[in-house]
Image (cartoon, rainbow, N blue to C red):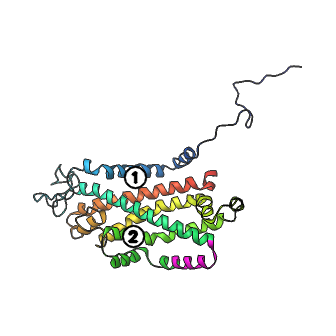
Amino acid sequence: MTVQTPDPTLDPVPGAGPAAQPVPPLLENWHYFTRSRGAVVGLGVFMALVAIAVLAPWIAPHDPAMQYRDALLVPPAWTAGGREAFLFGTDAVGRDILSRMMHGARFSLLIGLVVVTIALASGIIVGLVAGYVGGRTDALIMRLMDIILAFPSLLLALVLVAILGPGLFNAMLAIALVLQPHFARLTRGAVLAEKSREYVTAASVAGAGHLRLMFFTILPNCLGPLIVQATLSFSSAILDAAALGFLGMGAQPPTPEWGTMLAEAREFISSAWWVVTMPGLAILATVLSINLIGDGLRDTLDPKLKRS
């Protein structure tokens, strides 16, 4: 009887031999994220915008508030009548548009960060309380959220800024209040789905208090959809802030905020297209890149899509 020895060059039978090394969750999520080309492109554009915003004081060719009286409404450098010193042209008072756009990226990204932080933190607290406590507390909180959601977001933000007074800080507070119900409802739904699971019951039996159950046991398992919503709300905050600035209720001149730049250029739409087009393209590129990142995060954090 001949005994066959296994060929060491062949792959081992699945399940045999030493166990495979586990893949770190961060590396696994990055693998799924990079499967979406749009998300990767969006991340690249967004990181470039962040770099421009951080380095704007050093890489901007001109002071954003400097007025060149001999260069009023100069067209972009690649068109007839343009100058190399002003790549994207100048506005009605001779300020360099490229420099103002670079500094404007700082304001737009700061607006998105502050608004999402306030809306996310307050929405998580409200949603946790509503979903965990339940009963009349849940009904009261959700009816209040429904009332806020019943109003058009931009209209409600405009009313709040009119009450608080025009300004960038008041605009951020108003937009955060408008976006907060989305996080509250999303958190409440996730808490209702998680609080009846076995691990929550086990933690409660082990003696965990209500605050520990809410913030350390249930909340970490609800962060997936909240991260995606925060990404999408980031772009909404930038759009709403630009709209408020365009209406004169957000950042005030001479602040180089993209919406304010559009407001200052309204009367030159037909005569100087670059004054309106350049800030508009900046808003478009920023919002589109963030939305692409949000789509990639949704596909990455959804276990059903991972299995497909």
Q: Which mark is residue 269?
A: none
Q: Residue at x 28, y 61 (%)?
A: 277
Which amino acid type corresponds to the residue marked 2 in the rendered image?
Leu
Q: Residue at x 56, y 55 (%)?
A: 299
Query: Which residue is tagged 1?
Result: 46
Q: As rendered, which of 19 and 123 lies closer to the eye?
A: 123
Mark 1 burial class by Cα count in 10 Å: few <14, some 14-19, many 20+: many
Q: From the image, give the main secondary structure of the stretch colored magenta.
A: helix
Residue 225 image point, x, y percent: 55, 61
Please name which of the two marks, 2 or 1, marks the residue nearer to the observer. Answer: 2
Residue 62 image point, x, y percent: 20, 52
Query: Which residue is tagged 2?
Result: 173
Instruction: Say if 256 sits above or below 3 in the image.
Output: below
Q: Residue at x 38, y 77 (%)?
A: 160
Q: Which residues are magenta?
A: 133-145
Which amino acid type corresponds to the residue marked 1 in the rendered image?
Phe
Q: Earlier in the sequence, mark 2 or mark 1?
A: 1
Helix, strand or loop under label 2? helix
Q: As rendered, which of 223 and 207 lies closer to the eye?
A: 207
Number of marks in picture: 2
Residue 39 image point, x, y percent: 47, 52
Compared across the picture, whether 302 is left or right of 170 comes to right
Compared across the picture, whether 116 is left or right of 92 comes to right
Q: Is residue 136 magenta?
A: yes
